[in-house]
Each structure stands twice: as structure tokens, then as C-alpha cells.
Amino acid sequence: MNTGHANQATLRLLLWSLAALVGLFVGAWAGRQLGGFILAYHKIFIAVWALFLVAVVYLSRDPNPAEPSDLNAIVAPAHGRIETIENAIENEFVKGACQRLSIRVSFTDVQVQYAPLAATVAHFEHRRAGQDGGIAGAESLFIGFDAIGRASEKVAVRLIGGTWGKRILPWIKSNDVVSRSVRIAMMRPATRVELYLPPQVKLLVNVGDEVAGGQSVVAKFV
């Protein structure tokens, strides 16, 4: 009874040990080949990493804006190119007629956004990608500002990101009091930033102009 079971167990043990030995030799051979390949082309690997390092550092740059001295000035909320200037109706915060400026932010532009004027954050809404009420499924951050010292003057900024992942990082919240040109968010990689201004402000930019966030004067209160 149970004749040969011990021999079968011994055979299985020997086969497993043989498989482990073969696996060890194969792993050593593959490691040797891989190590030889890496050592032979190590300069290429170092160059690729160096390019990656330069790209990350460049895209993460955060220069200090030179805030204008004119207290009536409204600055660009983002780095980029003026893509659209038009009269519009904004119903979320301004709730009426306004002037809309759309700034196209390229992949190589600074990815930080700034407060366009000294104000109180009166409206704050962060919509995730795909959330109901969003813009074609894109992530967005809508901020409404009540201008300090200017009764009933409302300015709004909308950051529009991508359709996947969380890419907008706000640095302010509702009821915060912010200075002009202070950093308010980072959107990486950014796509577009819209600025909603009162109808009576004087625009100082044209479509196609390049602007620096927190620094370039795009309009003035008159």
C-alpha cells in the first residue's frame, strides 16, 4: 500500500530543484546580457535622463512677476498668448455683460496662474474632469473676485485643464483676500485661462499678444 509515493515525492523535489537551478542560470545569463547592454550604451541612458531633468526643471519654473505700480491696472492671470477678445454674458458670478479674454497657454509656458487684481475670493468652484456642468468634460477652476475698494466691480478667472486626471492645483479658497499678482493656482500642463472683465474697463491688449502672468497689464479701471 502506498508503494512508490516516496519515490514520486523525491522525483518532484529533484525536478523542482533542477528547475530552480536552470532559472538561476537563465537569470544570470539575462542579467549579464542586460548589464552588458546598459554598460555599452550607458552614455545614451545618461543623456536621456539629463534631457528629462532639463525638461522637468524648465516646465516647473516659477518666476516672480514684476507687479505694475499702477493701482488701476489689471494683470494677465496666466502666461501665454491672447487668443480671443469678445463681449460676452457670464452667468455664474458676474451675472451679466462682460469682456472675455481667452489666453492660450502652451506646454512650454509657465504653468502658474495669478490674481489679476487685489480682491476677495467671492466665488470658488473646482470641477473635476467629466463632472456634470463642466466644459466638454474638461477639468476647470472658476474663481470670482470682488475688487477691493471698488464697489460692485466683479472680475472672474476660469482655468480650463484637460479631460483626464487632476491637473489643477488651487492655492486659494473662498473668502481669501488676495493681492494682485499673487499666485493662485498651478495647472500642468495648462491649456487655457479665461478672464472676465467689467464692460467699462479699458482693454490694453489685442488678439495675438503674448502676455506674462501677474505682470502684463491687460486692462485698466477708468
Image (cartoon, rainbow, N blue to C red):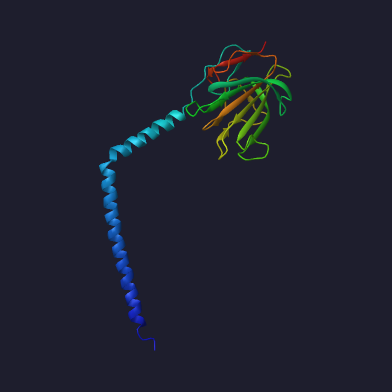
171 left or right, relative to 88: left
| Quadrant occupied by the C terminus | top right
Q: Position of residue 88 (x, y in %)?
A: 69, 22
Q: Position of residue 162 (x, y in %)?
A: 56, 35
| Quadrant occupied by the N terminus | bottom left
Q: Position of residue 30 (x, y in %)?
A: 29, 54
Q: Nearer the viewer, residue 53 or 91?
A: 91
Residue 134 makes an appearance in the image: yes
Q: Nearer the viewer, residue 169 or 179?
A: 169
View extreme (bottom): residue: 1
Question: In percent of the image, x 35 and y 36: which residue is there?
Answer: 48
Q: Nearer the viewer, residue 58 or 41?
A: 41
Question: In percent of the image, x 42 and y 31: which residue is there?
Answer: 55
**What count of labels does the image hold?**
0
Question: In percent of the image, x 34 and y 74: which residue is there?
Answer: 12
93 left or right, relative to 159: right
